Amino acid sequence: MLTQLAAATGVLGLLTLVPGPDMAIVTRRAVSRGRADGLRTVGGIAAGLLLWGALTVAGLAALLAASAEVYLAVKLAGAAYLCFLGIQSLRRPGGGTDDGAGVGAGGSGSSGGGSTSGGPLPDRGGAGAWRTGLVSNALNPKIAVFYTGLLPTLAPRDLSPAAGMALLVLVHVLLTLLWLGTYVYVLSRARQFFTRPRVRRAMDRVTGIVLIGFGVRVATSAA
């Protein structure tokens, strides 16, 4: 069992390291709002993985993956959300405002013009950061396909199918927390550089284009 678990952990680790929408979203939040907001975003991403994991163990994710209509609806919703975040980044002035989830919490110039100064923003978008991570994963049907297609082949044979799947989901969540949490820490160490107005504008444009690119790829990809 330990050998199979180690092999499965290695495969999940490699897949976790592959850059994707999660990394782009975490970059956006960590650079604009700081380490705490970046970590909250990571927490939301982990919650989204746990949600898909619970649906997988319950057998509901397999139904979604098998239904072309439902899969398409979730896929297009997820693609639209990524494009929305990308457009928000492109439209953001050099100082930066929060994404749509955090604007209502005071991130868009509700207190004295801090949103156009180019400096660090006050940490007022915690719930928005968590929701951003959660929604981006909850609207990603690729995770359902990944969990129902790959995890059963990696699950330790000494455990029941449900227990083996649950264990691998937890391993995946822990690897994601470790990797993205470390990434947020590295970004926060260099935040003084990233919060310079010119650098922020460039980062907003790059991140916006990347998120829109991921959104288009999700929308046009096959199941």
Image: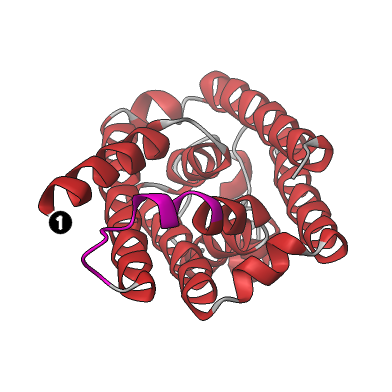
Image coords of residue 185 (percent x, y): 26, 40
What residue span does the magenta drawing correspond to?
Answer: 149-159
Outermost residue, front side: 157
Q: Locate residue 76 relative to residue 201 in the image: left or right.
A: right
Task: Say above or below: 210 vs 54.
Answer: above
Q: Is residue 175 visible?
A: yes
Image coords of residue 189 (percent x, y): 26, 33
Q: Quadrant of the N terminus?
A: bottom left
Dot 1 corresponds to which residue?
1
Question: Disc 1 on helix, strand or loop?
Answer: loop
Outermost residue, left side: 2
Tag 1: amino acid:
Met
Question: Residue at (30%, 41%) from the top-left corner?
Answer: 179
Outermost residue, bottom side: 58
Q: Locate residue 48 relative to residue 209 in the image: left or right.
A: left
Task: Say above or below: 85 vs 27.
Answer: below
